[in-house]
Image (tube, rainbow, N blue to C red):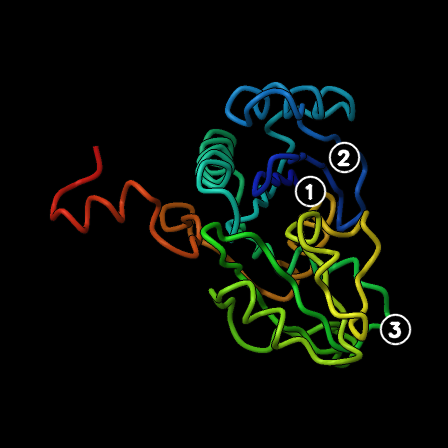
Amino acid sequence: MNILALETTDRTGGVAVAHDGEVLLEIGLAEDVRSAQSLAPSIRELLDRVGWQPADVDLVAVTVGPGSFTGLRIGVATAKAFAYAVGAEVLGADTHEVLAWPCPPEVSHLHTVVDAQRGQVAARRFQRGDVRGLIPQGDSELTDLDAWLASLRPGASVTGPMLSRIASRIPASVHTLAAELWRPRAGNVARLAHRQYSAGRRDDLWRLVPVYTRLSAAEEKARHHGGPPG
């Protein structure tokens, strides 16, 4: 199975291609250009470099959140449009699960954390299971940053893009994963998607949507005033 993976939940996104779970090539999106402008050219470059035609893609995998409102919308819309155009299937990947994928095997308890803005974070817990590796313990939760920091227990490990801002506030008794593991990677989106697809998971092209931690500021303002966002 040929997989095209898109990761646009943060400012530094990327794209990757994989065959049967083995990543063939991964490239990062230009950091000085918006995802809306860089994503399509990056996909074209990626396919050209591995010698694939768009129709060679069997599955398009994309992170669906939590993450940046704009990034998620662009990533999911691009994934759906590409899949529809070439007749491929589509699979949405949870950002927390993508972050947990490269976690070292010695880690038994992991917390993933994503910036939710306004002093809050989207957090999820994982525990080492059987051959499936880290298993989610509940859903992603929206919580105040201070409350999340206070909830961390000695011996646990943490990862996530939010650490680039708060690593110094992590308690000394909590292990912080290596900085190169803090951000979700397109290659890990591909690996996770391959495992989940092989296990029988499927997504509906028409129903796949971003998973937001909250309404956008415009939507919250519109709801407060009783009208649609402008």
Please give the count of numbered marks on the rendered protein.
Answer: 3
Along the viewing direction, whichever of 55 and 152 lies nearer the viewer: 152
Q: Earlier in the sequence, mark 1 or mark 2?
A: 2
At x 40% / y 48%, what residue is drawn?
209
Residue contact at pointers 1 and 2, CB within 8 angstroms: yes
Q: Is residue 139 above or below residue 91?
A: below
Label 3 residue SS: loop
Helix, strand or loop at disc 2?
strand
Q: Label 2 vs label 3: CA separation? A: 26 Å
Element type where label 1 sits in the image? helix
Spatial distance from mark 1 to mark 2, Cα to Cα? 7 Å
Give above or below for 185 relative to 202.
above
Q: Is residue 132 above or below residue 218?
A: below
Crowding at dot 1, Cα within 10 Å, few <14 / some 14-19 / many 20+, comes out as: many
Nearer the observer: mark 1 or 3; the answer is 3
Question: Residue 6 in the image: x percent, y percent?
Answer: 61, 38
Q: Which residue is mark 2?
A: 26
Q: Left or right? Give the position of 66 relative to 198.
A: left
Q: Residues within 10 Å of mark 2 (few under 14, many from 20)?
A: many
Amino acid type at circle 2 is Glu
Residue bearing mark 1: 186
In percent of the image, x 81 and y 68: which residue is there?
A: 175
Residue at horizontal 68%, vertical 54%? Answer: 166
* Three-letter code for the amino acid on which mark 1 is drawn: Ala
In the rendered structure, which amino acid carries the disc numbered 3? Glu
Residue bearing mark 3: 106
| Between discs 1 and 3, the one toward the N terminus | 3
Q: Earlier in the sequence, mark 2 or mark 3?
A: 2
